Amino acid sequence: MSKIKLHIVLLVGLAFGYGVSATAAFASEGEGAAKPPADFEYHPPYEPVLEPPDMPPQHSDKEPGGTADHSKFEALQKDFKSGPEVTKACLSCHTEAGKDFMKSVHWTWEYKNPVTGQLLGKKHLINTFCTNARGNEGACAQCHAGYGWVDDTFDFTDQTKIDCLVCHDNTGLYYRMPQSEGNAACAIMFENAPPLDWKRMAQHVGMPKRRNCGQCHFYGGGDDGAKHGDLDSSLFHPGKALDVHMDEKGLNFSCAACHVTKHHQWAGSRYNVIAKDTEGTGKPGMRRDVATCESCHGTEPHPDRSIANLLLNNHVERIACQTCHVPELARGGVATMTDWDWRTAGKLKDGFGYFEHNYTQGNGKHRKTYKSIKGDFKWGENLPPQYDWFNGQMIYKTIDTKLDPSHQPVAINAYQGSPDDPSSRIWPFKRMHTIQPYDKGNKTLVYMHLWGDDEAAYWGNYDFAKAIEVGMKEADKPYSGKYGFIETYSFWPSTHMVAPKQDALACNDCHSRNGRLEGVRGVYIPGRDANPWLDRIGLLVVLGALVGVLGHGLIRKILRKRGDAA
Amino acid sequence: MNLRQIMVYTRFERFWHWAQMALIFALLFTGFRIHGFYELIDFRTAVTWHTGIAIALVLLWIFAIFWHLTTGTWKHYVPTTEGLWRVAQFYAFGIFKGEKHPYRKAYWRKHNPLQALTYLALKLVLFPLVWISGIAYLLYFLWENVRDSGELLSGVAFVHTAVAFAILAFIIVHIYLFTTGHSFVGHVKPMVTGFDEVELSPEEEAYLEKDEPGHIR
């Protein structure tokens, strides 16, 4: 296979959503092209552009105190040549930061759920998108807050490997690349990448801005907005209609304004959600461990000015704030992925991979609906979420879980909760539907070897059998040798993109037949629920009374007339 | 025995009756909206009015109970079987033959036995049921964490809705019965002016003329 053609396929389909319109136009015309267009330039999806100095400051967890100017620090007056050099300089003053940070999931990619006991985190999990980071770190660790994790040899105890800048660079110029070059043909990806001015960035550090968090979290699932539906690039510069808190001209919250930290441990973990916060605001400055709505708005968030608000405050016990206040998913002009079918991956045109982009999203950008390296996708915008009882816990199907293929789709992360559980509330979820490879013999999910400069890596060779065999072998997991495809769901609790109050769900949206909560059981919702027999009998009684009196009156009239006539 | 115009419905009773009528109509209208029978008004508006009006009606009831107990008017509702059968027979047969209503309003007894029994049932069964179920409904937030609260709430809603149907049926029959006996206007007028024709014994007449001259014309 022509290496140049291969790199085009890889380029257009990479897991990171490199939406380069130049390559898109080029490759989609199917010219196969001997070489990339001369004006091709690599851009990370989040465009490393200088933050204008007059940008309004984003409100963070800790407001900048203004007592230190990093550009005047002696330790930062060096011509740094690499990230780890900068990190060493950071740690020379922030002596405890390295130790603290190493406990964070941003570093460990591992989380042991204290309630379910499951070992989670990107190091282990399989999702319904690119499926597994494990074994593909060279690509996926582009979003690991460390330098150089490409395989098991990465030293998780080396503090100089921490990437401080990815979170703390305030110039906007920092960006990250895949940690290994993958297939040789992918070299083009790394060409023309703008050089990094380490010294300038080191001297302009601060609390993380939306750009810092968003460069990874807005691109989860392999592309802009793909995974969550409430996190995408529209939140870099949101207006009030999209998000009341992050509204650039208003409150202008950074992510860390809510996701507060304590010793580099972030509040608001998706692996252990606080589905119902009964503590509220706590004492001033006390709550450093939660990112709940209640931690700022209290447990009676609607001002006691009307009967409706009093009644709304009673909803808080059973309905998550997000259910009404995150009315739709993907509202910012960026679509979210709703379906992924891996079965169609590997189709080639003239022997080469290709892609299609048959979806144009709100902001005018074309989204890819087929990639040879991934299969078919569907996208959606302004989607009503799925609602159900949720107590904050998910039971994950891990690599070791025996699946039951007779009950498909399989919920990869089955949310827990019920109407009888006081810690449960009705939550909104984005539901992702996927058809993905699994081990037909052992009935387990599989690790796929997607990224690498070898003959097994799926991205380049299009051979599931090889990719799965190697993926499982490298992780030391049993593989029957027979793969099939299984239908899965994954669920993503929605909590961002909080709409202005006038755009929140109205009472009618749930208190009606076929409303938003149509499928939620275990609770009587006036306007939605009624005992059909009571309604029938009740109407019959009323009608009977009406017919009875009319009949009674009629007979009176007739008989009286007869009497008069007589 | 003399037929005289006497005050059968005092100012409070008339206010109570008409206020209750307006509030109950409003509750039926907003309540069936909440129930989902129609969407003429917004759900939020319906709930706001339904709740506010219900609280007003409960307050009115509390005052009315107090009033009945302190004035002794409650005695009008004491059930009796005396004449009950004859009144029932009248509505079932006699009315068609042009017979006269067998009941004569008395000064100390302004409702016929069937009427008194109906009102008593309304006051002792339907109103308390709708009142208790409504308050339980409104205070759901206090007991939503008890086991199977969802099922219980649907039971509460069942009772509340069932009573609403019953009250609506009552209203239909209640209004219809004004067309019997005297004219419709003849029935409604006392509830407006307070005065109705009642046969008085000479003693009653003398007492009223002397002690309550405002209550007799």
Image (spheres, grey):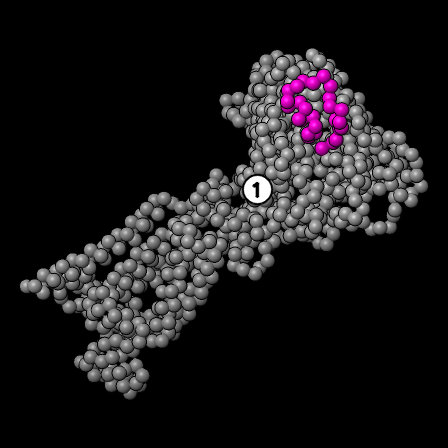
Q: Nearer the viewer, residue A130 or B9?
A: A130
Q: Is residue B163 magenta?
A: no
- In the rendered image of this protein, does residue A336 appear above or below residue B73? above
Q: Residues within 10 Å of mark 1 (few under 14, many from 20)?
A: many
The residue singled out by tag 1 in the image is: A328
> x, y percentage for residue B216?
27, 82
> x, y percentage for residue A505?
54, 47
Instruction: Report whether A212 appears left or right of B16.
Output: right
- In the rendered image of this protein, does residue A86 appear above or below residue B118? above
Residue ID at (39%, 50%): B38
Q: Is residue A189 visible?
A: no
- In the rendered image of this protein, does residue A501 appear above or below residue A493? below
* Magenta residues (range): A19-45
- In the rendered image of this protein, does residue A462 appear above or below residue B144? above
Residue ID at (25%, 62%): B176
Q: Is residue A27 magenta?
A: yes
Quarter occupied by the N terminus of chain A: top right
Residue ID at (18%, 80%): B1
Chain letter of disc 1 in the image: A
Residue ID at (66%, 40%): A234
> x, y percentage for residue A476?
69, 17
| Quarter residue B54 falls in | bottom left
